[in-house]
Every structure is written in structure tokens, then in C-alpha cells.
Amino acid sequence: MSSSKEHHLVIINGVNRGFGHSVALDYIRHSGADAVSFVLVGRTQRSLEQVLTELHEAASDAGVVFEGVVVPEVDLAHLNSLDSNLARIQSAAADLRYEAARSRRTITKSVLVNNAGSLGDLSKTVKEFTWQEARSYFDFNVVSLVGLCSMFLKDTLEALPKEQYPEHKTVVVSISSLLAVQAFPNWGLYAAGKAARDRLLGVIALEEAANNVKTLNYAPGPLDNEMQADVRRTLGDKEQLKIYDDMHKSGSLVQMEDSSRKLIHLLKADTFTSGGHVDFYDE
Amino acid sequence: MSSSKEHHLVIINGVNRGFGHSVALDYIRHSGADAVSFVLVGRTQRSLEQVLTELHEAASDAGVVFEGVVVPEVDLAHLNSLDSNLARIQSAAADLRYEAARSRRTITKSVLVNNAGSLGDLSKTVKEFTWQEARSYFDFNVVSLVGLCSMFLKDTLEALPKEQYPEHKTVVVSISSLLAVQAFPNWGLYAAGKAARDRLLGVIALEEAANNVKTLNYAPGPLDNEMQADVRRTLGDKEQLKIYDDMHKSGSLVQMEDSSRKLIHLLKADTFTSGGHVDFYDE
């Protein structure tokens, strides 16, 4: 095969279900890449293997050359295993780069999609949170993101240095939220965490622009998924609860595939402002 | 004395030097309160006692009734001592409320000023940070803030419940930064931390509005102080470094007193939008 074709190496966490799963499938279907190498990061081996099988099928249907590696038993909430998990993800990416080289393919784009995250306890207001809860929340949703972004950027820019691969692009995506830019009651930790993530990617965008790195904070909208069901079960603020309940009943929550397709189209078009925040509802 | 006069109970951390020190002095001079009870939180007993003496003098000059308690040896970077430190701050506030009651004064406003914070390592870009550095940063600058805000709000609203004290106001201030709203290279952790703090106070503003609580994220501008000198010594980005160096040389850095006076005037006028971000340079 020609090395001029698009070959993307993509790392996604929380890919075993929900939005991460949907993003992975749509990446294969809509990214425009001729070949995709996937590092699938998540908790249980079994569900990751299932996703891998699905992705193989989707790739076959779409005529995309596909290679995938699963990195199971990764729980970003536990920092004591973060270093070893980062090493495993890094090693899986190295394996996929080696495979690509063996097939005489040039990796044209490396993408990290930070999809894993937690809601925090939405029954509580900020004054009801202990600092211990806040620490767990930031460990999982922000500190581990710094570790992951740092590893990914160093690893990618060392493996595919700009001098040798001037055409290679690197993209870091964070699954963000409206809460990153607008406050609502009972979302204290979630909103603060998303705001921190958004700003972090904003800084990376400036720091690494000369290395062909772009970043994107993508707010997928109120998705019709398990996390939204958790929101409806736990959210303490009655006013918002009614809005989400009404959206659920009237079927106006955002379908995961609609939102993941929008994200993949953004990445494909590559016209988004690096470091910015884009919402599903944005034009 | 009449209980209809303004008596403020103010907790400030990082008050031993720099901007916190300036805010404390200007609070006494310009807040318009007839009496001020201060909880001075910081690291060394000796410097806090010095500040206390200065505040006594300033109060005497301004004709303000003044009472102050120091809470020394508080380092918010160490979470293992946070609970005991929060308990000491809470106890100091209780003492001051008791003293006020003994003097037949009604506390009309309780204020927490979150001034303590750290720069992080400005020589590094995000890809150079380890997650351990990120964790230390968020522990100090965000997690401890959640603990402090949570303690302060619970304590204040229990001590001065709205039903019994309908006129009592509560204000939470966070010393923020332009970085909370705009990204610059080499400020990854600082910017993410400030963004998280801003959003956290935005959520509190909504959650506690019915309890007469307001919050304010105040960006004091590039202050002519020790922290700015640290910035000039450590900042890795040459372009910004030149800007700060030029500002320093031309004397156009913001004087601490100018900025602290603006903050106190904002608090006095009380017309700021709760949960918002106000910069020194704003009209």
C-alpha cells in the first residue's frame, strides 16, 4: 500500500461502553482514514475484546485497514497504578507503530481521546463535599488526564519527530461539557474538573502548536446514555432534573451516534480552533 | 454600640505577606465596616503577629473597632493536616463571633478570602509535568479550597442562620487570574487550577444564593510583588517573560494597594455579579 494514505493511531479510554464506544465506531466509519490503529483502554478485558471484534467488523464493512490492541484493567481513578497503566498504553502504541512500519505505512495522525470521567455525587452541593471527595474527583478527572496527556505528547513527539515526519499531526481531545463554561447547581466538582481540563488543553494548544499538535474540548451534549440515566437518578437540583426528565421522555436527549459523528467530522475537517471548546449544539 | 452598624467577620489565608497582607489592610481602611473581626491564616506565627499589630494600628487610625485572631502553621499544601487546620480556623471564627456577641454586636457580613496559592513550575510545559506534580498542585490550589469553602459555608450558615439573621450576608472570594479565562504557554497547572476555582465559585453562587451568599473571582492583575518576581525568574516562555520584564522595568506592574483597594471597593459596593470573574483592569 502507498505510504501517502492516511493512517491514524488512536488511543481512546473508557471505550468499553457509552460515548467512548460510539466514538471508536464512528472513527472507523467517518474519519476518512484508510487505516486505523486503535489502542482501546478500559476496565474489563472481556468488554474491550467485544468492542475490538465490533471494530474489526466495522472496519471490514468500511474497507478500512484496521489493527487494534486492548489495554484492560485500567482504572484512572487509582493513581497508584497510573504509571504502570501509562507504560502499558505507551507500549501498546509502540506495538501499533511497529506494525504500521512493518506494513510500510506512515502514521499520518496520532490522536488521544480522553473520554473516561466521572460525575461526582450530584446529590450534593459544594458545601456538602469533603476535601477527600474533591481529591478523589480531581485525581480521576484531572490529575490522571495530565499524566495521560503528558505521556502521549512526549511519546508521540519522540516516536514521530517533526524533523523526520513534517506531515504528521497530533490531536488531543477531551470530552468536555457545557458545565466547563456554564455553572449549574450541584455540579461543583464536575464543572470545576471540566473547566480545568478545558484550560489545560488550551495551554497545550499554544505550547505544542509548533509541533503540529492541536487540542479540542468537545462537549457532546446531554447524551441518551447510562451516564445521563445516573444524572436523572442522582441530581439534587429539581429544576434541572425536570429538564432532563422531560428531554428523556420526549426523546430529545442527544443520540450518542449523532454526537460522536459530529466529533469525528470535526476531527476530519480539522478546521476547529486548537485549544477551543466546541459543543454538539454549535453550528 | 448599636447592632445596626456593619460588623464583618473576615477570614483571609496567605495573609502574612504579599497581596493577602494588602487586602487585609485595605479591608480595614476601605470596607466601610464599623467593626472588623479578622481570622488571619498563614504559615509563621511571628509574621502573622506582625500583621496583626499592623492591622490594630490601621484600625485605630481608621476608627474601626478591631479584633483579630491568628491561626499559624497552616500550609494548605499538606492535606494530612487540612482537617485539623480547618477546625482551628472554624474555632477562631467561633471565638470572634462570641466576642462580638459579648459586645452586643451583630455580625452583618462573613467573608472568606482565598488568597493562598502557588504558581507551579513555570519552566515546564504540560508535557513535561508528571501526574505527581499535577496532584500536588491541585491538592494545594483546588482540593484545599473545596475543604475551606465547604467548612466556611457550613459553619457560617449554621452559626448565623438566615431565619434568625435575615440581613446577614456571606461572601466567598477567590483570588483568580487572567489565566482562569485565557490560556498562555507554560501556565498549564496554574491556569487549570484557577479555571477550576472560578467554576467552583460559580456553582456555589447558584447553590447558596437563597442563603444570601455571593461569590467573587477577582483577578488582581500582574502585581508588583514577590510572586511576580518568581514569575520573572522561572517562566519558560520568552515572549511573556519579555512582557513581564518590560512591565517591571517601566513600573507598569500593578501596585498591590491599587488592586486590593479595587477588590475592597467591589465588596463594599456589592454590585458585582455573584459567581463572576472580575479583573483589576475591568471598568
Image: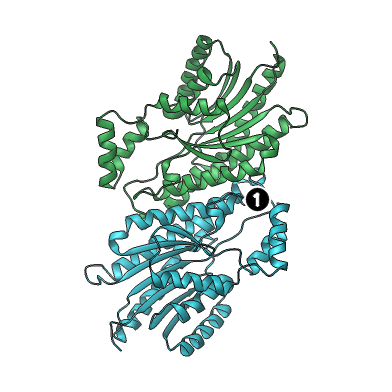
Chain colours: A cyan, B green
Q: Nearer the viewer, residue A42 or B34?
A: B34
Q: Nearer the viewer, residue A244 or B172?
A: A244
Left/right of residue B125 with respect to residue B51 in the rendered view: left
**x, y (%) of residue B53?**
49, 15
**Snapshot quadrant of residue B90:** top right
The three-letter amino acid code for the residue at tag 1 is Asn
Left/right of residue B166 with respect to residue A160 in the rendered view: right
Q: Is any part of residue A136 visible from this angle?
A: no
**x, y (%) of residue A21?**
54, 75
**Snapshot quadrant of residue A245:** bottom right
**x, y (%) of residue A41?**
49, 72
**Snapshot quadrant of residue A266:** bottom left
Q: Is any part of residue A268 visible from this angle?
A: yes
Q: Residue furthest left?
A: A163
Q: Is residue A92 above or below residue A2?
A: above
Residue name at image x 24 percent, y 31 percent: B249
Left/right of residue A35 with respect to residue B77 in the rendered view: left
Q: Chain of mark 1?
A: A
Q: Residue furthest front?
A: A283
Image quadrant holding the N terminus of chain A, namely: bottom left
The number of callouts visible is 1
**x, y (%) of residue A195?**
50, 52
* Tag 1 residue: A186
Q: Nearer the viewer, residue B127 or B23?
A: B23
Left/right of residue A100 with respect to residue B149 in the rendered view: left
Residue name at image x 61 percent, y 67 percent: A223
Q: Secondary structure at mark 1?
A: loop
Q: Is residue A54 above or below residue B234?
A: below
